[in-house]
């Protein structure tokens, strides 16, 4: 895992939580039924479901990274740095 992975995961979680909130709000609005075709409403619901499955997995990775020593790709257990 690269040194950028924790930051990328953190940003992804924030962005996906924001997107989930926007989608949930859109789905719950009364205008959605009148304005959006059924196919688009269904796609929004499917995207929200996908995000709801992905977020717990990303949170698990985030927690696991918090308990893992910093990864150093160049480290050698028998070499002096």
Image: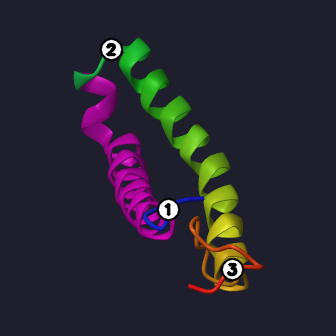
Left or right of 78? Residue 16 is left
Mark 3: give few (<14), some (14-19) or many (20+) Cα within 10 Å: few
Residue 6 horizontal/vertical position (percent):
50, 69
Query: Are the residues flagged by discs 1 and 2 in contact, CB closer than 8 Å?
Result: no
Left or right of 52? Residue 11 is left
Q: Which mark is residue 45?
A: none
In 3D space, how far apart are the residues under numbered discs 1 and 2 (Cα atoms)? 38 Å
Observer-side mark, 3 or 1, equals 3
Residue 33 horizontal/vertical position (percent):
34, 27
Q: Is residue 75 magenta?
A: no
Query: Are the residues flagged by discs 3 and 1 in contact, CB closer than 8 Å?
Result: no
Q: Which residue is mark 2?
A: 37
Mark 1: give few (<14), some (14-19) or many (20+) Cα within 10 Å: few
Label 3 residue SS: loop
Residue 46, above or below 39: below
In 3D space, how far apart are the residues under numbered discs 3 and 1 (Cα atoms)? 25 Å
Residue 67 horizontal/vertical position (percent):
72, 85
Q: Between residue 25 and residue 55, name the one nearer to us.
A: 55
Q: Earlier in the sequence, mark 1 or mark 2?
A: 1
Residue 25, above or below 79: above
Q: Which mark is residue 79?
A: 3
Residue 31, above or below 42: below
Instruction: Give, as a single range, the part of the protein colored magenta.
Output: 5-34
Left or right of 62? Residue 47 is left
Q: Which residue is mark 1?
A: 5
């Amino acid at each position: 895992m690269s040194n950028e992975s924790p930051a990328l995961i953190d940003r992804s979680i924030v962005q996906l939580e924001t997107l989930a909130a926007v989608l949930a709000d859109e789905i719950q609005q009364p205008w959605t039924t009148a304005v959006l075709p059924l196919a688009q409403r269904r796609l929004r619901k499917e995207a929200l479901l996908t995000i709801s499955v992905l977020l717990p997995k990303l949170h698990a990775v985030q927690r696991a990274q918090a308990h893992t020593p910093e990864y150093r790709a160049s480290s050698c257990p028998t070499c002096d740095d």
